[in-house]
Image (cartoon, grey):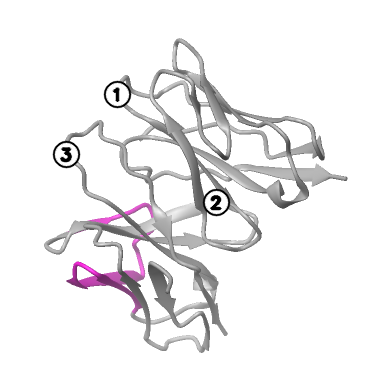
Amino acid sequence: DADVTQTPRNRITKTGKRIMLECSQTKGHDRMYWYRQDPGLGLRLIYYSFDVKDINKGEISDGYSVSRQAQAKFSLSLESAIPNQTALYFCATSELSGGFDSYNEQFFGPGTRLTVL
Amino acid sequence: DAKTTQPPSMDCAEGRAANLPCNHSTISGNEYVYWYRQIHSQGPQYIIHGLKNNETNEMASLIITEDRKSSTLILPHATLRDTAVYYCIPGAYQLIWGAGTKLIIKP
């Protein structure tokens, strides 16, 4: 089984609909992230969470909200979807290690392809 | 987290070494440099990271300049399966991802 799973893998919705993307991990990591990727571009951070009680906005949080229900689950919601939110969405996790200069690579899910009509 | 400059695309012949440069001139003294790659539209995959010394693992080697303002990822014997977008990301939390370098391995 995959360590980081995302559901759904593909979703087509209409403008104005509320959409939730879910991410689950079995790695036991404290840190979780949501990224968005538009065609031909790199990843842009939407929200990140360093533990269950910690939620931080990323570069492009407008129009999105998140919920960290448990250590293993981090959900991304689009309250009222619009066409320019059509993109590939990735969830990632990393381990909380001590110290600012500690290293910790991110582990990514397979992505959710969202289309807003 | 520091920002980076990478060439948008590079070609390399199969079997040759692929050298991917990255400029990260604003990196802080205690920030690691991480490299990931993304094959097609899959989730990015971690390759290697380093702080000051050169590093090598089963996937690649990482050369970091003495002033730490730039680094080079080396794939010693590139194969067609190494065709991907390669991202260089400095910073403890790896929160800022640029567009990366699209590496195309040619037969």
**Residue A83 rendering spot, x and y as whole percentages:** 54, 77
Task: Inspect the image, locate mark 1, and give the three-letter code of the amino acid beneath it.
Answer: Asn
First reached walking from the N terminus: tag 2 or tag 3: 2
Q: Which numbered marker is on residue A98?
A: 3
**Residue B37 rendering spot, x and y as whole percentages:** 57, 48
A10 lies above or below B64 = below
Task: Inspect the image, locate mark 2, and give the three-letter code of the amino acid beneath it.
Answer: Gly
- Segment tinted magenta in the rendering: A55-78
Q: Which numbered marker is on residue A42?
A: 2
Q: Which numbered marker is on residue B72?
A: none
Q: Which numbered marker is on residue B30?
A: 1
Is label 1 in a helix, a strand or a loop?
A: loop
- Chain at numbered mark 1: B
- Chain at numbered mark 3: A
Closest to the observer: B82 or B21?
B82
Q: Is residue A28 left or right of residue A78?
A: left
**Residue A117 rendering spot, x and y as whole percentages:** 57, 85
Dominant secondary structure of the residues highlighted in magenta in the image: strand
Tell me if residue A9 is in the magenta stretch: no
Residue drawn at the location 50% of the way across and 14% of the way down: B65
Labels 3 and 1 in the same subunit: no
Is label 2 in a helix, a strand or a loop?
A: loop
